[in-house]
Image (cartoon, rainbow, N blue to C red):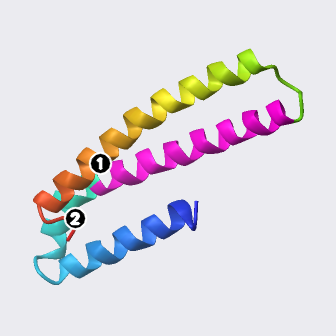
Amino acid sequence: IYGGFSFMYSHLLSVFLFLGCLESQSSLEKRCTPVLQQILDIQHIREKLREDFKDVTRRYREKKVDKIFWTKHKNSWHEKENSLASRVNDLYNYSYDTGCLK
């Protein structure tokens, strides 16, 4: 949201390029690319799930789905969002701890 995935990708790329000045590009890529890619992948999944739930909410407001259907989707989205947010937070912490992000 607020630039979402594109903003995050450009931010991570700029951090990645900055760190490239401090160690060899090859070493940096080998060490950091997998974890940064995981972060981007999870953020992309979160964005997709958020958009899907937004659509269900819109349909609920338009009376196209009932409250039971909406509540099941809300609970499912919330559970997935919490899990993915925790995973990405762990990856960010790891990235800071290992110097992939500063």
Residue 73: x and y, percent? 64, 24
- Give the magenta-colored segment's residue range: 36-61
- For numbered disc 1, what is the local secondary structure? helix
Q: Which three-letter amino acid code belongs to the residue tagged 1?
A: Asn
Residue bearing mark 1 = 89
75 or 14: nearer the viewer: 75
Vertical placement of 49 versus 60: above or below? below
Depth check: 88 or 60 in front? 60
Residue tagged by mark 2?
29
**For the residue labelled by badge 2, is the local secondary structure a helix, a strand or a loop?**
helix
Give the answer, above or below, for where 26 lies relative to 73.
below
- Number of residues whose C-alpha sits closer than 10 Å to that of mark 1, classed few (under 14), some (14–19) or many (20 or more): few
Residue 12 x/y as whole percent: 35, 68
In whole angstroms, how far apart are the C-alphas of marks 2 and 1? 21 Å
* Residue that appears at 65% across and 44% down: 51
Please name whichever residue, 39 or 63, is drawn nearer the observer in this view of the structure: 63
Residue at 24 percent across and 81 percent down: it is: 18
Tag 2: residue type?
Answer: Glu
- The first of marks 2 and 1 along the sequence is 2
Q: Quadrant of the N terminus?
A: bottom right
- Residue 95 inside the magenta-drawn segment: no
